[in-house]
Image (tube, rainbow, N blue to C red):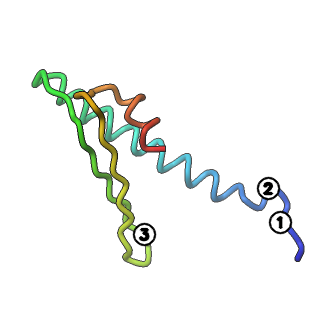
Amino acid sequence: MKSLPPDAYWPLNRLGEAIEAAALRLLTRLCRDLERGQAGLRRLRLELRRVDGRVVPVELGTSRPMRAPDHLLRLLR
């Protein structure tokens, strides 16, 4: 079986980067609202909807309340 050249995966890598950037924007807004309310989250569920209609849930939990978007993004990876 012939393998694909590394640049053949470029569109998939770019898609992953776009999803990650969108998630960071959402987390930043959420964490800003949590900070205003002097609160944090311990559980988060992100639902990604595919073009075929399938929903891919991504969940995370923390041991203490969090409101740091960069840290939450790392947990989602």
The structure residue drawn at horizontal position 27% and vertical position 27%, both measured from the top left corner, is 67
Residue 24: image location, x then y, percent = 40, 38
Specify few, some or many for label 3: CA neighbours under 10 Å numbering under 14, 14-19, or 20 or more.
few
Above or below, 51 against 77 in this view is: below
| Residue 26, position as x, y percentages in the image | 32, 41
**Position of the N terminus by quadrant:** bottom right
Q: Is residue 47 above or below residue 41?
A: below
Mark 2 or 1, which is nearer the eye? 1
Residue 41 placement, left or right of 9: left
First in sequence: mark 2 vs mark 3: 2
Q: Residue 45, how many percent across, how many down?
A: 28, 51
Rendering coords of residue 65 (x, y %)? 22, 28
User: In the picture provided, is 6 more to the left or to the right than 25?
Assistant: right
> For residue 63, which quarter of the picture?
top left
Q: CA distance from mark 2 to mark 3?
A: 24 Å
Q: Secondary structure at mark 1?
A: loop
Task: Look at the numbered disc 2 and give the secondary structure of its residue.
Answer: helix
Count the numbered circles shown: 3
Q: Give the class, few, some or many, for how many residues have Cα within 10 Å of label 1's Cα (few <14, many ≥20).
A: few
Q: CA distance from mark 1 to mark 3?
A: 24 Å
Which residue is under mark 2? 7
Q: Nearer the viewer, residue 23 or 40?
A: 40
Instruction: Name the residue type under label 3.
Output: Arg
Q: Image point 37% across, 76% down: which residue?
A: 53
Name which residue type carries label 2. Answer: Asp
Residue 50 is marked as: 3
Residue assigned mark 1:
4
Q: Does residue 7 lie above or below 62 as drawn?
A: below
Q: Are marks 2 and 3 in contact (CB under 8 Å)?
A: no
**Amino acid type, callout 1:** Leu
- What residue sits 27% from the left and 28% below the top? 66
Q: Is residue 15 left or right of residue 53?
A: right
